[in-house]
Image (cartoon, rainbow, N blue to C red):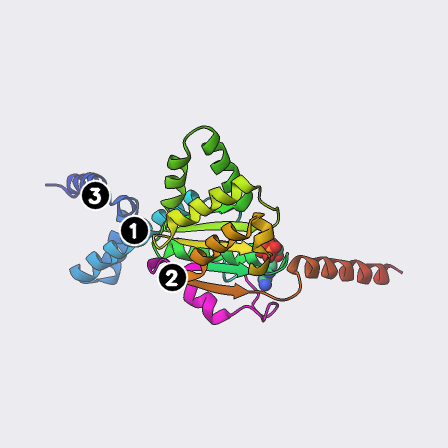
Amino acid sequence: MSDELIHARVSDRLTKLRLTHVVTRLDSLLSDAARADVTYLDFLDRLLDEETEAKQRKRVTMAINIAHFPMVRTLDQFDFKFQPSVDKTLVRELSTGRFVANGDNVLLFGPPGVGKTHLAIALGRAVVEAGHPVLFTSATGILAALAKASTDGVLNEKLAYFARPKLLIIDELGYLPFEQQSAHLFFQLVARRYEKGSIMITTNKAVTEWGSVFGDDVVAAAILDRLLHHSHTLTIQGESYRLKEKKKAGLLRNSNQTTRE
Ligand code: ADP
Ligand code: MG
């Protein structure tokens, strides 16, 4: 059989086996192998390595889309020197995704602008890369969704939807106080996920203030009891990064003025 026919058959079978990356790379892989005079085993190893890598990249890209992160933020972009109060060792440990495998929760405390959302997104991405499904939501978004589901008589389905991902990230809890119905809905969500899946929460309120956030000390205590049972806390104390950026911009403007004068 001619080389051309064999090539066509190989491409066809690779496609049927869904080894789609190798199909597009076949010619260059073949010519690289011919030039470098590699063994059959090396060639096969290289081919499978590329396909595995490509499949992993595709899986991560899809899982990141499903996670609904509001923007791209990574741990590499986080300036730990600017925020020395952040426990870098704990962040590294959390980025392995082991806490998700154990069903532990993560609470990120700190004032506005110190990088809570940045770290939540970055850790969420790391957890996706470690192979766990993640969903990112805001406290107001998730409560609006649960309240609507309750009105529409489909609360159970909605709770099931939010219980599914291995890690549920709830951003910006406490910026707006809850109505009493919201506090009960939130309790149901936390109870549903308790010891089944991890929750990561970012908040500007210390736990002592959660009673006023939820408008009900008893519900707040019940929620905290479940959240804190198996949990890691990261507390960020420091200056707002947004403010630092603004100050820097201000300084730059000043120096421009100086040069113009
Ligand atoms: P928070 O959620 O605590 O209010 P954000 O995470 O939204 O703060 O941070 C505000 C902005 O500053 C974001 O664009 C974020 O990427 C950036 N930022 C905050 N802290 C850092 C940091 N230590 N290094 C790099 N960028 C940071
Ligand atoms: Mg935030």
Residue marked by disc 3: 14
Q: Does dot 2 land on a helix, a strand or a loop?
A: helix
159 to 206, vertically: above or below: above
Where is residue 45? Give x, y as percent. 22, 59
Does the magenta segment cover residue 90?
yes
Q: Secondary structure at mark 3?
A: helix
Badge 2 amino acid:
Phe
What is the three-letter code of the residue carrying label 1? Ser
> Which residue is labeled 1 in the image?
28
Question: Can residue 72 be seen in this snapshot?
Answer: no
- The reply to whether the magenta stretch includes residue 54 is no
Residue 139: x percent and y percent?
Answer: 53, 46
Quadrant hosting residue 246: bottom right
Q: Earlier in the sequence, mark 1 or mark 3?
A: 3
Name the residue at 42% across, 67% down.
Answer: 93
Q: Quadrant of ligand 1?
A: bottom right
In this view of the protein, which residue sits in the foreground, 80 or 29? 80
Residue 178 drawn above or below residue 35: above
Viewer-closest of 81 and 45 = 81
Kindly report the distance in space between the C-alpha atoms of the residues bearing marks 1 and 3: 15 Å
Mark 1–mark 3 CB contact (< 8 Å)? no
Name the residue beneath numbered marker 2. 99
Q: Residues within 10 Å of mark 1 (few under 14, many from 20)?
A: few
Where residue 1 sits: x, y (%)? Answer: 10, 41
Outermost residue to the front: 218
- Mark 2 Cα-neighbour bin, 10 Å: few <14, some 14–19, many ≥20: many
Q: Is residue 154 left or right of residue 177?
A: left
